[in-house]
């Protein structure tokens, strides 16, 4: 399940759909920036929106991916002469492998960005 929504909508979705998302891989593609100024994140300095989602969905397998990749480069499959890169972070190795397989199956490059705690650096 890809959460392709503005980050303020996530809390409502996780509250309303948490049971339906249990057992599923949930991909956070949000960028929790301050929509008024676009100059800072709206999550605590030691956390991420992905960590908040994982806490709200303890029965789901949450990963961070696609948020650093523009739609045009996903469609094109390249950035210049290089394959489009998708960074994938999470604590569930199988979930990360599943998302990485989707990415590489589409002809893109998947890079393991580390654990869920690394989602902060991805935004």
Image (spheres, rainbow, N blue to C red):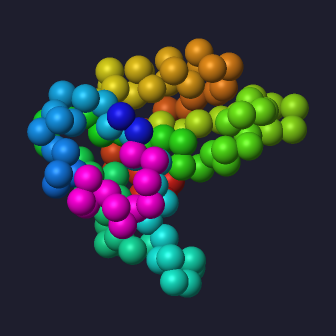
The residue at the point 59 percent across, 50 percent down is: 68
Residue 9 magenta: yes
- Using the rendered image of the protein, determine whether residue 40 is visible from the camera's viewpoint: no
Vertical order, 93 against 21 (above or below)? above
Q: Position of residue 87 (x, y in %)?
A: 54, 39
Q: Main secondary structure of the magenta part?
A: helix
* Horizontal and vertical percent position of residue 77: 74, 30
Q: Is residue 68 left or right of residue 41?
A: right
Give the residue drawn at x 32%, y 66%.
46
Q: Position of residue 102 (x, y in %)?
A: 51, 21
Furthest toward the right, the residue is 81
x 54%, y 49%: residue: 67
Q: Give the vertical position of 97 relative to 40 (above or below).
A: above
Q: Assign the N terminus to one quadrant of the image.
A: top left
Asked if residue 67 lies in the magenta stretch, the reply is no
Q: What span is colored magenta in the figure?
A: 3-13
């Amino acid at each position: 399940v890809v959460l392709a929504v503005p980050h303020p909508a996530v809390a409502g979705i996780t509250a309303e759909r948490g049971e339906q998302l249990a057992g599923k891989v949930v991909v956070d593609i949000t960028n929790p920036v301050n929509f008024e100024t676009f100059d800072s994140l709206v999550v605590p300095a030691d956390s991420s929106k992905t960590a908040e989602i994982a806490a709200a969905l303890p029965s789901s397998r949450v990963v961070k991916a696609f948020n650093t990749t523009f739609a045009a480069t996903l469609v094109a499959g390249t950035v210049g002469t290089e394959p489009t890169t998708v960074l994938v972070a999470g604590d569930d190795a199988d979930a990360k492998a599943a998302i990485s397989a989707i990415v590489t199956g589409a002809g893109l490059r998947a890079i393991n960005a580390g654990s869920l705690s690394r989602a902060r650096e991805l935004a």
